[in-house]
Image (tube, rainbow, N blue to C red):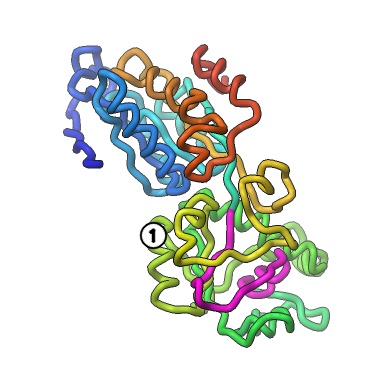
Amino acid sequence: MSFMKLTASTLAIAAITATAAAARDNVHVAGSSTVLPYATIVAEAFGENFDFPTPVVESGGSGAGIKSFCEGVGEQYIDVANASRAIKDTEIADCAANGVTDIMQVRIGYDGIVFASDINGNAFEFAPEDWYKALAAEIVVDGKIVANPNTNWNQVNPAFPDQPILAFIPGTKHGTREVFDTKVIEAGCKASGDEEVFKAERGDDGAKACMAIRTDGKAVDIDGDYTETLSRISADVNGIGVFGLSFYENNTDKLQVATMGGIAPSTATIADGTYPVSRPLYFYVKAQHIGVIPGLQEYIDFFVSDDMAGPDGPLAAYGLVSDPELAQTQADVAADKTMN
């Protein structure tokens, strides 16, 4: 798929009119690298089946996408922000300060966060506590908070191989990172009992300190998308990466996946809630652009249709866990229901 490049408008927001908006006749989307493949599938099908140009879909991470989304109203600003986490109150306030007051939150389904390594490397059976002890900047040893001394996985858990710790994790601009920090690192800190020590010694900042990631090269932030993580693992068999389930499922010839808490990640274990590291996926729509940017309403209706987001649609075939409340989402989108 070749994406059209947009020509930046020089008009101020106050001067935007329907005629000026016609300078951009396609929907513009940016944000989460996890949602990117789903949005691309929808955009390509939309361009093939509707009398509108194929939407422009770009990545950059949930935080970057929402930031761009909140910059203003008018055809020079994006219409849709993809996100692998819910928008924050601070981001809603930023949007409002720039005139973006009518925001639609659309949940498209669910995805799991998985921990995968080279298919020819060692196999792992993880618990959140293992990742906390491997990647936290500080841990508790003999009742005292110390800089993380662990360099190999068998120091974290004697059942693990004597393999250097090298983890490729999403950078802080990605929504996946926030879920990883909360559902893996923080959960592991609690499970180990260390969180109580941090709180006792550092008060209200204890829980936050518990989640701080080490910066000595054992944990490597990946600011690009999952293809960059895959290339890093391909270059070093010791590497273990954090991915979305769908990306792993489309690269099983290169990757093996670890269990988490004794549960293997799959669409079934995410749908029934037994796999512990899963999250809803969203896109956010600038309702003030509906009726101004051609095809925007049609695009969002099409995205959540049974044909695309249903359990037998192409998004599920790629790895999305279909939302059991999809019918309600469809009704909300048809009614242009906003968060306020």
Residue 38 percent location from the top left of the image = 43, 39
Query: Count of labels shown?
Result: 1
Q: Residue at x 61, y 74 (%)?
A: 123
**As drawn, is 129 to the left or to the right of 67?**
right
Q: Which residue is mark 1?
A: 227
Q: Visible in this render: residue 106?
A: yes
Residue 136 in magenta stretch: yes
Residue 218: in magenta span: no
Residue furthest bottom in the image: 162
Q: Is residue 47 left or right of residue 121?
A: left
Q: Residue 240: x and y, percent?
A: 53, 71
Q: Nearer the viewer, residue 140 or 226?
A: 226
Task: Point out the stretch of residues depicted in magenta.
Answer: 113-137
Q: Nearer the viewer, residue 256 or 85?
A: 256
Q: Nearer the viewer, residue 294 or 159?
A: 159
Q: Is residue 335 above or below residue 282?
A: above
Residue 333, compared with residue 136, is above or below; it is above
Q: Is residue 88 visible?
A: no
Residue lying at 52% horizontally and 35% vertically, measured from the top left: 282
Q: Is residue 287 left or right of residue 25?
A: right
The spot of residue 275 in percent (x, y) is: 70, 52
| Image quadrant in which you'd find residue 323 | top right
Q: Circle 1 sits in a helix, a strand or a loop, which is it?
A: helix
Disc 1 residue crowd, few under 14, some 14–19, many 20+, Cα 10 Å: few
- The quadrant of the picture occupied by the C terminus is top right
Identify which residue, 213 or 265, lies in the foreground.
Answer: 265
Amino acid carrying label 1: it is Thr
Locate the N terminus and report the quarter of the image it occupies: top left
User: What residue is rendered at 64% in x and 75% in y?
Assistant: 134
